[in-house]
Amino acid sequence: MTPDERARRSAEAMWGKDRASKWLGMSLDSIGPGRAVTSFTVEDHHLNGHDICHGGYIFTLADSAFAFACNSYNRLVVAQHNTISYLSPGRPGERLTATATEAARTGRSGIYDVTVTGADGRVVAVFRGASREIEGRHFEEEG
């Protein structure tokens, strides 16, 4: 099995059970070893009292990209901790995209960087997540 196939199969297994991301209106746009892209369109129910996308939804978008990236090796992986910095608002009707990339992975721990961008390419937020591998796999595989 190729690394890309393993990442795709791991993502399919996770996406099938990921009710939170689907409820948000998110899509999983791209997956590969140590990387993932998720996105959603900012709708009225995502807006806060300033009429911009609520930061919690932006965090969730970034966290989902992080989760798919760090789970791309057919190992069960959870978050240890993460941080986010908001740099510009998500606007009503705009598609936000979170791109996660692996910065480091050793033993059972990993570090992943996620950049959330707006439709015009501006940086909306920067997220860094630390992952921890736990026992289990997303699907059975030989070897």
Image (cartoon, rainbow, N blue to C red):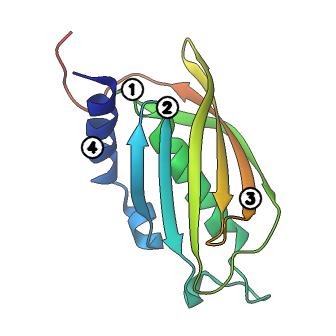
Please say whether residue 43 is visible from this viewpoint: yes
Binning the other alpha carbons within 10 Å of mark 3 as few (below 14), some (14 to 19) or many (20 upward) gives many
**Pointer 1 with pointer 2, Cβ within 8 A:** yes
Whole-percent x and y of residue 5?
Answer: 26, 32
Quarter of the picture containing the N terminus is top left
**Pointer 1 with pointer 4, Cβ within 8 A:** no
Above or below 7: residue 123: below
Q: Is residue 73 left or right of residue 131?
A: left
Above or below 3: residue 36: below
Cα distance in 3D space between marks 1 and 4:
12 Å
Cα distance in 3D space between marks 1 and 2:
8 Å
N-terminal of the two: label 1 or label 2? 2
Front disc: 1 or 2: 2
Whole-percent x and y of residue 22?
Answer: 39, 66
Q: Which mark is residue 13?
A: 4
Front disc: 1 or 4: 1
Above or below 133: residue 30: below
Quarter of the picture containing the C terminus is top left
Q: Which mark is residue 34?
A: 2
Q: Which mark is residue 73?
A: 1
Whole-percent x and y of residue 50?
Answer: 80, 88
| Amino acid beneath label 1 | Tyr
Which residue: 50% across, 70% down?
40
Cα distance in 3D space between marks 4 and 2:
16 Å
Which residue: 52% across, 49% down?
65
N-terminal of the two: label 4 or label 2? 4
Which quarter of the picture shows residue 42? Answer: bottom right
| Amino acid beneath label 4 | Ala
Question: Label 3 belongs to which residue?
Answer: 125
Please say whether residue 138 is visible from this viewpoint: no
